[in-house]
Amino acid sequence: MKNSIALAACRDPKFRSIFSMLYDTNRDADLFAKYDVHDIFECRILSVDPTYRGKGIARSLMERSIQEARLRGFKLFKVYFLTAKA
């Protein structure tokens, strides 16, 4: 229910489409039960300005995110990966 409210509030059709796909994937995958965890560290959106792409910024941010997840005791780190069209 909470997801459908958030989705309805999203005004950008591209983001609405992405979030709809993410919600459906989460529901279908049921990672909490599959991996017997109570918490999941998620990275949903990571964007680098086109001017700065190819410089390892996203990789560095992901590495730092994984470190943070480990420091906070998360057993599962979930990433959704989309690429921008050139």
Image (cartoon, rainbow, N blue to C red):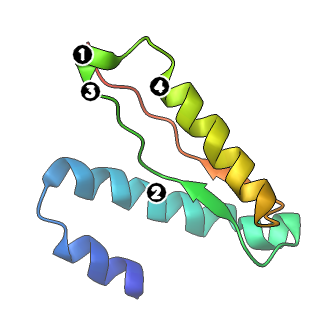
> Which residue is drawn at the image coordinates 20% and 75% (left, top)?
8
Q: Say which of marks 2 and 3 sits in front.
A: 3
Nearer to the camera, 59 or 80: 59
Q: CA distance from mark 4 to mark 2?
A: 24 Å
Nearer to the camera, 5 or 45: 45
Label at residue 35: none
Kindly give the residue lying farthest to the bottom in the view shown. 1
Q: Earlier in the sequence, mark 3 or mark 4?
A: 3
Q: In the rendered structure, are the residues bearing label 1 and label 3 in contact, judged by CB atoms less than 8 Å apart?
A: yes
Q: CA distance from mark 1 to mark 3?
A: 5 Å
Q: Which residue was labeled with disc 2?
A: 22
Element carrying mark 2: helix
Q: Which residue was labeled with disc 1?
A: 51
Nearer to the camera, 10 or 46: 46
Q: Amino acid at mark 1?
A: Thr
Q: Residue 3: x percent and y percent?
A: 39, 78
Element carrying mark 3: loop
Q: Residues within 10 Å of mark 4 (few under 14, many from 20)?
A: some
Q: Earlier in the sequence, mark 4 or mark 2?
A: 2
Q: Say which of marks 4 and 2 sits in front.
A: 4
Q: CA distance from mark 2 to mark 1?
A: 27 Å
Q: Say which of marks 2 and 1 sits in front.
A: 1
Label at residue 49: 3
Q: Residue 84: x percent and y percent?
A: 31, 25
Q: Which residue was labeled with disc 4?
A: 57
Q: Residue 64: x percent and y percent?
A: 63, 42
Element carrying mark 1: helix
For residue 48, say whether it is visible.
yes
> Which residue is drawn at the image coordinates 35% and 36% (left, top)?
47
